[in-house]
Image (spheres, rainbow, N blue to C red):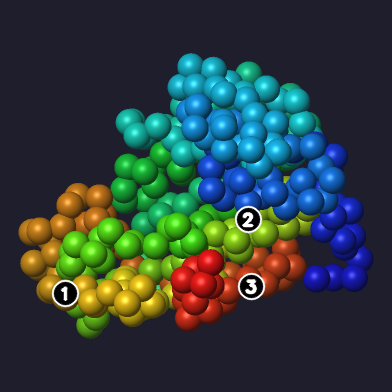
Amino acid sequence: MENSKPALKDALPARALIVGCGDVGLRVAQRLLTMGREVTGVVRSDQSAADLTQAGVTTLQINLDTEAPPANAPLLFWFAPPSNAGSSDLRLRRFLDANPDSDMRIVYISTSGVYGDCEGRWIDEDAPLQPISARAQRRLDAEQALAMWGGDYVILRVPGIYGPGRLPVERLQKQLPVVRAEESPFTNRIHSDDLAEAALHAAAYGTRTAAYNISDGNPTTMCDYFTRCAALLDLPPPPQVSMDEARRIFTPAMWSFMEESKRLKNERMLQQLGFEPRYPDLARGLAHCVGT
């Protein structure tokens, strides 16, 4: 990090709102509370509200499909996913329409899926945005909505998130197959703790309207990921099938991940945000998950 930048704890405002305060949101909230900040988490379910309250986070229960959260803090982390229908993020659009002149900073979690299939190439944030899946199209719509809003925002393009409680245990126990190593597409990952830290760095140091690839910088294949998880969990390795067979037997959701292959460059994150992942590869990140 450049010496001219203030320390992270001095660069963040006194209050923050986290919309969609689930696993990663709670990790952000806990870090902010440790810094003495006031944090409000927006969730929908009673159980999520109870979990946040127990963690010391002020909680608001809101149905984002019918209501916009308040714009009552200088910093907003928007971690709530779009609804599962259509090609637009109506939840975020509702909030932006209700706050056209807000001077708050929004840190928005998007997906690296907005790049679509890059045939295994290394790509940076200037790569064309050509989403394939409906969920990635909704995320791109959210990015476009933020650009039209014209306020202060930072976009985090996030790949697969793993961490304690986020490993594919049930899938491995069921011995569901993966595409064999020689055909498996490249995938990118980030540990949930690193994502929380990156979000805070983006809030403090991110360039207005910039997008950042948030990844550990060491992509592997999906076959490698599941095989490593199985070994660490002391489970049998998943059976491997050809791409043609996978096309026939995979669920549409699982197959959608097979249609894309890319390797994310994270130099902008490293240089502009001054953030280096604590878990820069699966070997160290997965070991932490099992030991937690």
**Number of numbered labels in the structure image:** 3
Which residue does the image show at 37% across and 51% down from the upper left? 131
- Above or below residue 267? Residue 127 is above
Q: Hey, what amino acid is under mark 2?
A: Ala
Q: Residue at x 60, y 61 (%)?
A: 193
Q: Is residue 125 left or right of residue 184?
A: right
Looking at the image, which is closer to me, 290 or 266? 290
Identify the disc placed on residue 278: 3
Q: Which mark is residue 239?
A: 1
Q: Where is the N terminus found, in terms of image quarters?
A: bottom right
Disc 2, SS: helix
Residue sitting at x 70%, y 38%: 56
Q: Is residue 120 in view from this perspective?
A: no
The amino acid pointed to by label 3 is: Arg
Relative to 194, 115 lies left or right: left
Check contact, mark 1 vs mark 2: CB within 8 A.
no
Q: Residue furthest front?
A: 54
Asked if residue 166 lies left or right of residue 34, the reply is left
Q: CA distance from mark 1 to mark 3?
A: 31 Å
Crowding at label 1, few (<14), some or many (≥20) Cα neighbours within 10 Å? some
Instruction: Please name the amino acid that badge 1 sits on.
Output: Pro
At which x and y percent is residue 84? 34, 34
Q: Quadrant of residue 62?
A: top right
Residue 244 in view of the camera: yes
Residue 189 position, x and y percent, is 47, 66
**Residue 14: x %, y % from top left:** 85, 40
Precedes in sequence: disc 2 or disc 3: 2
Residue 196's disc number = 2
For residue 88, the mark is none
* Mark-to-mark CA distance, 1 and 2: 33 Å
Judge by depth and name the residue closer to the eye, 198 or 122. 198
How far apart, in angstroms, are the residues tagged by discs 2 and 3?
11 Å
